[in-house]
Image (tube, rainbow, N blue to C red):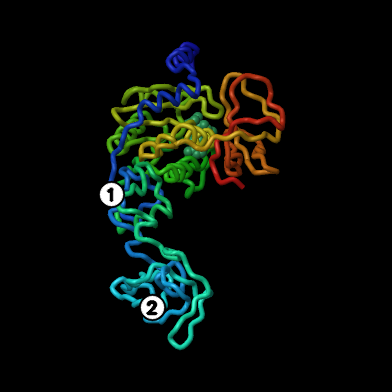
Amino acid sequence: MSSTALQAYEDRYPVLPVADAREIVGHHVPSVGTEIVDLEQIAGRILAAPIIAEEDVPSFPAATVDGYAIDASTRGTDFEVALELIAGEDGTRRSVGPRGAARIMTGAPLPRGTNAVVMFEDADESAGRVRIRRTPREGENVRAPGSDLARGQEVLPAGSIVGPPEIGLLASLGIARCRVGRRARVAILSTGDEIVSHRENPGPGAIRDSNGPALVAAVEESGGDAVILPRVGDDYARLRETIERALGTHDVLITSGGVSVGTRDLIKPILESLGTVHFGRIALRPGKPLTFATSGARLVFGLPGNPVSALVTFEVFVRPVLRRMQGDRRPERPRVQVVTASRLRPTPDRTEYQRASIRWEDGTLVARSTGSQSSSRLLSMAGANGLLEILPGGDPVDAGTRVPALITGALA
Ligand code: AMP
Ligand code: MG
């Protein structure tokens, strides 16, 4: 590239601080609407509207132990065993008389005339009579109607992430489907004449596409719906056509590669011709050439080609957007203070995200580097459950110092 062309590139794409770049992206996140999803498919989705209980749970007074249902206000300890009630029987239609007891199983409705349950362990039954060893309080061992969920109560607010307990709550209320945020439709395109499918044998000079499959997984994990586009190589016309078509049917396009200053780095000019490029360089390591553009309401993230750069920029820039699009009100990873086990040297002019393995050790979260942080070395990410955030400039950070980290995986 000529020096004037390089100068033009640098003028057109000033290096933005990470925070400024994230703010710009944040201004362009569209709302993609909602859809109704069956309970069977709803895990991980985000409620678009609050869930209100339309009935009491439980709907009847139910025994919480196996024992004898009696009227707790009865004097004396001797009762006649009038009934047996097992769970599923409509005991509320039956009744015991004065000094009567019902042998009752956990979950069964209490019969009329009773208001407490004495556990089997606190009673002796023989010849149709039961003697209790302890007088219960009214309501003891009974789950009152509405005590778990009261009719009219807001059970889950809008924005709740639906996990196992939420699904259980919906099921217990008889809610078989509900309205959730739609998942963003995301197209993924790997560029590069040297890239072949991982199913092919790379010839001389070629390498397998690792970004495509990795980004599909990253999108799905972030709550988006990913499709991978057929690669078309670094050909301006074919690349432009592929991108234009993808933008017609997807909310977000993620490309990898082709965003630097090489002669075959075509993504920036193509995006300029299809919409607005909001930034094309950021003060981030790895990931300096990250490019962000919009075309109407569609977003395009031009990730760098190096596999680590692609996944780190996805993590910091794309994941929160996909989570927000489907309604997550807290789309960011948890950010915590960890203690670095090794000395860290800040990059003079870029925020650095170093891949680390973070573990509890004696009551503190300790971060260990995952080895060489070269941007092609995916192994540095595979072993990582966190990204240490090292701000630009400043003195080296000594081992034993607290640094902020994004928690990106399970804590070991
Ligand atoms: P680029 O950003 O296109 O200059 O690519 C930077 C580096 O990342 C080059 O060494 C590429 O070969 C490599 N690379 C680009 N795309 C991929 C991909 N999809 N999978 C693995 N490596 C890639
Ligand atoms: Mg390339």
Q: Please say if 385 is above or below 348.
A: below
Q: Could you say where residue 164 lies in the image, as x and y percent from the top left? A: 43, 55
Q: Could you say where residue 252 lies in the image, as x and y percent from the top left? A: 36, 35
Left or right position of 160 against 175: right
Q: How many numbered tags mark residues here?
A: 2
Query: What residue is shown with label 2?
Result: 100
Q: Please say if 58 is above or below 218.
A: below
Few, some or many C-alpha atoms within 10 Å of disc 2 (few <14, some 14-19, many ≥20)? many
Q: Specify the amino acid type for callout 2.
A: Gly
Left or right position of 130 against 32: right
Q: Could you say where residue 61 lies in the image, as x and y percent from the top left? A: 36, 65
Query: What residue is shown with label 1?
Result: 36
**Nearer to us in this view, 191 or 322:** 322
Left or right position of 404 against 137: right
Callout 2: helix, strand or loop? Answer: strand
CA gap, disc 1 and disc 2: 50 Å
Could you tell me which residue is drawn at 65 percent across and 31 percent down? 402
Callout 1: helix, strand or loop? Answer: strand
Q: Please say if 283 is above or below 193.
A: above
Few, some or many C-alpha atoms within 10 Å of disc 1 (few <14, some 14-19, many ≥20)? some
Q: Specify the amino acid type for callout 1.
A: Ile
Q: Could you say where residue 382 lies in the image, as x and y percent from the top left? A: 58, 44
**Nearer to us in this view, 121 or 216:** 121
**Mark with earlier residue (1, 2):** 1
